[in-house]
Amino acid sequence: MKITRQKHAKKNLSFYKYNFRFREPYQVLVDGTFCQSALKNQIQIKEQLPKYLMGEVQLCTTNCVIKELESLGKELYGAKLIAQRFQTRSCAHSQSPVSGSVCLLSMVADDNSHHYFIATQDQELANKVKKKAGVPLMFIIQNTIVLDKPSPKSVAHVQAMQASQMFPEHQKHNIEHLKDEQGVPRVTERRGRKRKHVGGPNPLSCMKKKKKNDPKPTTPAPEQKRKRKRKRNKPTAETA
């Protein structure tokens, strides 16, 4: 089960690395509900999260989250102690603190230029995060930390970028590498086969072959033997 979870985490994390340029150390913004759930399920966030993401992690929160936990009293005292151990990121509400969910949404506004992860158990906050492209969402389920799959908004954003050809060449190469890694078949253009033209027979091959007028061999006529004419001596008067 652990190997399967890590495979899913690697697959989902690769999506954000190749399409939205997430890099180590991964910055994870944690709210009070996530800290409370980790305390309840005895999860050591600092130890388990880097193993799960297979990389260096910076756990962080905001002053608004800590103020909210302080205002909720003793019931969330343990969650407040956990949140105070993390790095504190400056937000725009130093003068007038707001709720933790509002503060975290403001930290990933626009294009999430700081590449934050959001770790929360607040379902309302999670739904709002899913409406933003390029914001990974983490939560705790069945005593384990889970990195949610890319939201439809993030997937649509990537597809729109591909369609408009706004990706640089190196990003296109990274996307193809990601597809190969995930086993997604590449789309190849189907080229129609050239059909051979079926024509008639070659007219030259249909012509009758001309008979060669070979001269018949002539046999030499047999030579006629010349008959020698014997000269007969005419009888002379004396012999007569």
Image (tube, rainbow, N blue to C red):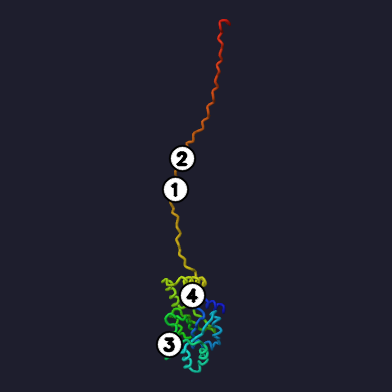
Specify the label residue 202 is tagged with: 1
| Front residue (pair 120, 228) | 228
Tell us which disc is closer to us: 1 or 3.
3
N-terminal-most mark, 1 or 3: 3
Query: Where residue 128 appears, x then y in whole percent?
Result: 43, 83
Instruction: Please state which of the two labelled residues, at mark 4 or mark 3, is closer to the viewer.
Output: 3
Q: Is residue 229 left or right of residue 167?
A: right
Using a 10 Å C-alpha cutoff, classify the residue at mark 1 as few (fewer than 14 neighbours), some (14 to 19) or many (20 or more). Answer: few
In front of the other: 226 or 3: 226
Of callouts 1 and 4, the N-terminal one? 4
Query: Mark 4 or mark 3, which has the lower sequence index?
Result: 4
Q: Secondary structure at mark 4?
A: helix
Tell me the residue at 48%/84% (across/down): 29
Position of residue 220 measured from the top left corner of the image (x, y, whole percent) = 53, 28
Residue occupying the far right of the picture: 239
Amino acid on which disc 2 is placed:
Lys
For mark 3, what is the residue? 92
- The residue at which mark 4 appears reads as 18
* Sooner in the amino-acid sequence: mark 1 or mark 2: 1
- Could you classify mark 3 by the number of other residues whose Cα lies within 10 Å: few (under 14), some (14-19), or many (20 or more)? few
From the viewer's perspective, is the residue at label 1 or at label 4 nearer? Answer: 4
Give the SS element for disc 2: loop
Q: Which residue is mark 2?
A: 210
Secondary element at image label 3: loop
Distance in Å between CA atoms under marks 1 and 4: 60 Å
| Residue type, label 4 | Tyr
